[in-house]
Amino acid sequence: MSAGQSPRDVISFGDVEQLREARRIIRQEADALGRLADSLDPSFCDAVRAIRAATGCVIVTGIGKAGLIGQKIVATLASTGTRAHFLHPTEARHGDLGCIGSDDIALILSNSGETEELVTLIPVLKSLRVPIIAITRDDQNSLARQADVVVQIGQHQEAGELGLAPSCSTTAMLALGDSLALVLSQSKGFTARDFAVYHPAGSLGRQLCPVKEVMRSGNQLRIASENETVREVMIHHSNPGRRTGAVILTNETGRLTGLFTDSDLARMFETRRDEQLDQPIRQVMTCNPITIGPDVLLPEAIHLMSERKLSEVPVIDKDRNPIGMLDITDVLQKVDVAEHGSGTPPAFESRRILRTA
């Protein structure tokens, strides 16, 4: 149901039956995942260690629905810091085996473990001294008996009225592959900054860009000396373009010493401190304000602004010279709130994960 639509007041009997069946299928697959999670044993850890020990790539292979799951696992491995390629078992027997090296490791997916195209591939992998990890139903099949590590998904009744189409078994394979990729990523110390390198485009790329790509700089900034009066700063340091609600204040060497915001000015008038308009702004500025570096990733900056309730954060270089200003309006535009409706941007929701980027 799309945004703005409301549920139908009347649902036909046929629709009720279809919804009931759909919910039953989803719950059946969810139950399969629950059983898989409960049955995981140290062989999973053996698979993680084996992949970490390999100096080459993870060569993932499978056929049919398992092959499609394998391609998704390859994508997850690659995007989380583990080099991986998909090898179609049929094409492998017609020349594509040349892409495998002795420093690689094979990850073979097969529910039954008896698929001919995969079983006949194993002797070739053995001759190349390529370690084999099998993701399969149990350890009593041809694939499992020849693999170096066997991670069992268990035997699952497939979903649906016929119970024939791969569904629960492929869902289990996918979840296990995701778990393998993400645990590997964690064990390698893969960070949000690493993730950003592999995702430069699209929504993720926009959210994981460095602060320097979002900050205001150059003539978009209001920078003044801490020795100027409040009145002088307000008169002489205004910008005709995009307005920022804060003035960056510096000392004689150009280093940042303080920040004076529109809210600070408003409080002066609210408390009838008009005489301070003609006093040095250093007397009313926020000394040593919270700052951020230009290479910090946007989610970490968002977390900082959210936790400290900041609308503007000065961006400084290693010598504390101001080089930019991060403004909350620019941040929200960057993460494309409009695309996600009026709710909280995904970057805010992910700040706990990304705070150590």
Image (spheres, rainbow, N blue to C red):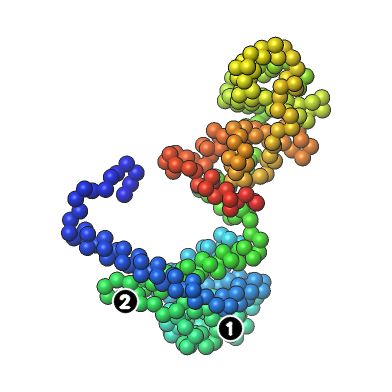
For residue 286, say whether it is visible: yes
Residue at the far right in the pictured view: 253
Residues marked 2 and 1 touching at CB (< 8 Å): no
Q: Residue at x 70, y 41 (%)?
A: 293
**Image position of 313 (left or right of 75):** right
Residue 183 lies, in percent from the top left, at: 58, 66
In this rendered view, identify the residue nearer to me: 129 or 70.
70
Q: Label 1: which residue?
A: 148
Q: Is residue 253 above or below residue 181?
A: above
Sort mark 2 into few (<14), some (14-19) or many (20+) by Cα contacts within 10 Å. Answer: few
Q: Which residue is mark 2?
A: 164
Which three-letter amino acid code belongs to the residue tagged 2? Leu
Front residue of 305 and 335: 305
Q: Residue at x 29, y 63 (%)?
A: 22
* Crowd around label 1: few <14 · some 14–19 · many ≥20 (10 Å): some
- Choose the circle earlier in sequence order: 2 or 1: 1
State left or right for residue 70 relative to residue 246: left
Horizontal and vertical percent position of residue 332: 52, 37
Q: Position of residue 340 (x, y in %)?
A: 44, 43
Residue beneath the point at 32% across and 41% down: 4
Where disc 2 sits, the SS reads loop
| Quarter location, residue 301 | top right
Q: Residue at x 41, y 80 (%)?
A: 155
Quarter of the view holding residue 330: top right
